[in-house]
Amino acid sequence: MNLTVDISLYPLRDQFIPPIDDVIARFASYSGVDVDTGHTSTLLIGDYDAVMHALQTEMRRSFTLYGHCVFVARFIGRDVREPWGDGDTVAPVA
């Protein structure tokens, strides 16, 4: 089963860009997880178990390293790059 997660990280600190860049780079290091970054969110796409493992590991790591931060995510039970029933594809959410 494939999964797409549209996720945003909001570190509650003045220097918020470095933690965001770090977590995106760490998500990209996981085998079987495709990462597509947008202006306001990042798509994680792959096998359900691989994506959930990356999420669990990196969310815990972020809370430990960066303290107070907020993750906002939407979970879609499919690869949004694949055609829908009518043959159209959905553009990545940015």
Image (tube, helix red, strand yellow):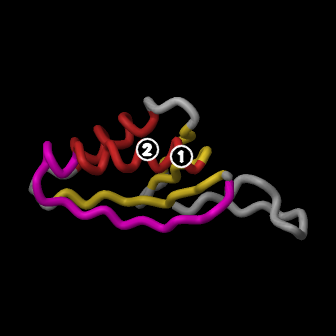
Q: What residue sits 42% from the left and 65% below the top?
A: 73
Check residue 49 in the rendering and tell me which mark sits there, or answer none.
1
Left or right, 33 with respect to 16, comes to right
- Residue 92 to residue 55: above or below: below
Residue pictured at 31% horizontal, 62% vertical: 71
Q: At 63% from the left edge and 63% from the top edge, which residue is drawn?
A: 77
Residue 25, quarter of the rendered image: top left
Find the residue positioned furthest to the right: 86
At 52% across and 41% down in the image, what residue appears?
Answer: 50
Q: Amino acid at mark 1?
A: Asp
Q: Judge by depth and name the residue closer to the eye, 57 or 13.
A: 57
Q: Is residue 26 above or below residue 62?
A: above
Secondary structure category for the residue under label 2: helix
> Left or right: 71 with respect to 34?
left
Does residue 63 belong to the magenta stretch?
Answer: yes
Q: Is residue 38 magenta?
A: no
Asked if disc 2 and disc 1 are in contact, CB closer than 8 Å, the reply is yes
The residue pinned by badge 2 equals 53
Q: Residues within 10 Å of mark 2 (few under 14, many from 20)?
A: few
Please tell me how crowded label 1 is: few (under 14), some (14-19), or many (20+) other residues with Cα within 10 Å: some
Query: How much space separates mark 2 and mark 1, taking CA atoms?
Result: 6 Å
In this rendered view, identify the residue nearer to me: 39 or 42. 42
Tag of residue 39: none
Residue 78, position in %: x, y?
Answer: 67, 59
Q: Position of residue 63 (x, y in %)?
A: 18, 51
The span picked out in magenta is: 62-79
Label 1 SS: helix
Relative placement, left or right, of 27 versus 93 is left
Give the image location of residue 36, x and y in percent.
54, 46
Task: Choose top left, top right, bottom left or bottom right for residue 53.
Answer: top left
Residue 68, quarter of picture: bottom left
